[in-house]
């Protein structure tokens, strides 16, 4: 299917097209930088330089040290590593066997938590209010000296709702445990500085910011106890075995650089676009529900429901009809669209299951 078949692509939170200057960096490295970054000959050393330069760029963008950035295959792996790696390390070292996650997390977090449950960990899901904002007081009630990790995403991928990360980080720190935040939807869109926000771990993905798919990173604050998920080589300072994909890593760094340039102007531009789109929808479709408030969400995501008392329509058929008209949108997260289940995010916000579909 050609790009022209989708004159209106509105699914940037699922994935973005690749920026041409990112793809030319990738192509050039695929052709020229084929050495293994672990080899000691000149081909390997050249690859190693690109690897470390890219790490510096990504670290700099979030105010971290390069030694705190570890490349992964994307947001999913970073979330899995954060939860599973921390939980096992904390249980082995300190006997901690309790995890707290928000109920609106991406499935990369929720399903990692489920996996941990099958390995004897206790998991507490913290719910959100009608605006999708987590009850920090509930974390305070549930956190205890057995808590190995708290995971709360920065902005939700379905609604764009931002969580009070600073407040949660302070609470987690006070309780001497580890704080992970999935920042896949905020990196490159709004400033994310690890010391200002206070997270110990965060997940990044390149393909949400005009970078390549299949590459991302995990930030691990120095001194955090965490096990590796992949074993078999000493790459990434024993934290992630496997030959590094230099072309994708260089493309990822290029995408981060581009995203940081003019970030503020772009943010305001997207804010205006969101207002315009809301206005058009409000003026043309009756009984619509906007599922996030402007002051508590990033403007890049607009989540709209059709009231089930007026409309009897399944989201899948609506999406297919919009597709036929040349408009590409998603119902819920990319990893769950295709299923007819109501969105777990909207359900957590107390929406009617029929309206969320
Ligand atoms: N976390 C969030 C919030 C996401 O939106 C996504 C992507 O859909 C992921 C994690 C997974 O990232 P990736 O597709 O790079 O594995």
Image (tube, grey):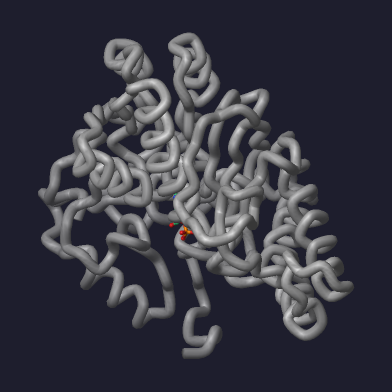
Q: Depth check: 323 or 144 in front?
A: 144
Asked whether residue 287 appears in the rendered view, the answer is no
Residue 285 x %, y %: 31, 56
Residue farthest along the right direction in this orientation: 42
Drawn side of residue 36 relative to residue 42, left or right:
left
Q: Position of residue 33 (x, y in %)?
A: 79, 77
Q: How many marks?
A: 0
What residue is at 73 percent from the left and 34 percent from the top?
63
Above/below status of 317 relative to 122: below
50 relative to 336 in the view: left or right: right
Q: Quadrant of residue 149?
A: top left
> In the picture, residue 177 is in which quadrant?
top left
The one nearer the camera, 236 or 187, is 236
Q: Residue at x 50, y 73 (%)?
A: 8
Position of residue 42 relative to residue 218, above or below, is below
Place of residue 90 in the rendered image (x, y in percent of width and height, measured from the top left) = 41, 28
Ligand 1: quadrant of the figure: bottom left
Residue ranking furthest to the bottom: 1
Q: Look at 29% across and 64% down and name the residue there.
A: 337
Does 96 appear above or below 175?
below
In the visual, does 44 lie left or right of 101? right
Residue 58: tell me if it is visible.
yes
What percent of the width, then of the height, locates residue 155?
47, 39
Task: From the viewer's perspective, tell me whether residue 49 is left or right of residue 151.
Answer: right
Q: Which quarter of the image is occupied by the C terminus? A: bottom left
Residue at the image position 49 percent from the left and 57 percent from the top: 231
């Amino acid at each position: 299917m050609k790009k022209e078949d989708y004159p209106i692509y509105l699914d940037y939170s699922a994935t973005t097209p690749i920026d041409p200057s990112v793809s030319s960096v990738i192509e050039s490295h695929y052709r020229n930088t084929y050495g293994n970054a672990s080899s000691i000959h000149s081909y390997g050393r050249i690859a190693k330089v690109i690897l470390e330069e890219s790490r510096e760029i990504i670290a700099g963008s979030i105010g971290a040290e390069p030694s705190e950035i570890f490349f992964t295959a994307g947001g999913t792996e970073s979330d899995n590593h954060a939860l599973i790696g921390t939980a096992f390390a904390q249980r082995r070292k300190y006997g901690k066997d309790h995890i707290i996650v928000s109920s609106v997390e991406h499935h990369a977090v929720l399903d990692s938590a489920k996996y941990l449950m099958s390995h004897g960990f206790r998991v507490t899901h913290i719910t959100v209010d009608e605006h999708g904002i987590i009850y920090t007081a509930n974390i305070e009630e549930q956190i205890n000296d057995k808590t190995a990790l708290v995971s709360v995403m920065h902005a939700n991928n379905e609604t764009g709702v931002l969580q009070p990360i600073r407040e949660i980080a302070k609470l987690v720190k006070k309780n001497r445990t580890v704080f992970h935040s999935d920042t896949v939807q905020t990196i490159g869109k709004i400033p994310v500085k690890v010391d200002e926000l206070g997270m110990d771990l965060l997940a990044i993905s390149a393909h949400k910011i005009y970078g390549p798919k299949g590459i991302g990173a995990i930030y691990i604050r120095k001194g955090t106890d965490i096990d590796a998920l992949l074993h078999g080589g000493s790459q990434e300072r024993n934290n992630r075995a496997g030959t590094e994909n230099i072309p994708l890593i260089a493309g990822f760094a290029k995408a981060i650089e581009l995203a940081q340039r003019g970030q503020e102007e772009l943010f305001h531009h997207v804010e205006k676009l969101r207002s315009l789109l809301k206005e058009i929808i409000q003026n043309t479709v009756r009984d619509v529900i906007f599922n996030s408030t402007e002051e508590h969400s990033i403007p890049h995501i607009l989540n709209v429901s059709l009231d089930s008392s007026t409309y009897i329509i399944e989201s899948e058929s609506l999406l297919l009809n919009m597709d036929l008209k040349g408009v590409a949108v998603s119902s819920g997260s990319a990893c769950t669209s295709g299923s007819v289940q109501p969105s777990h995010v909207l359900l957590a916000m107390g929406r009617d299951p029929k309206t969320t579909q």
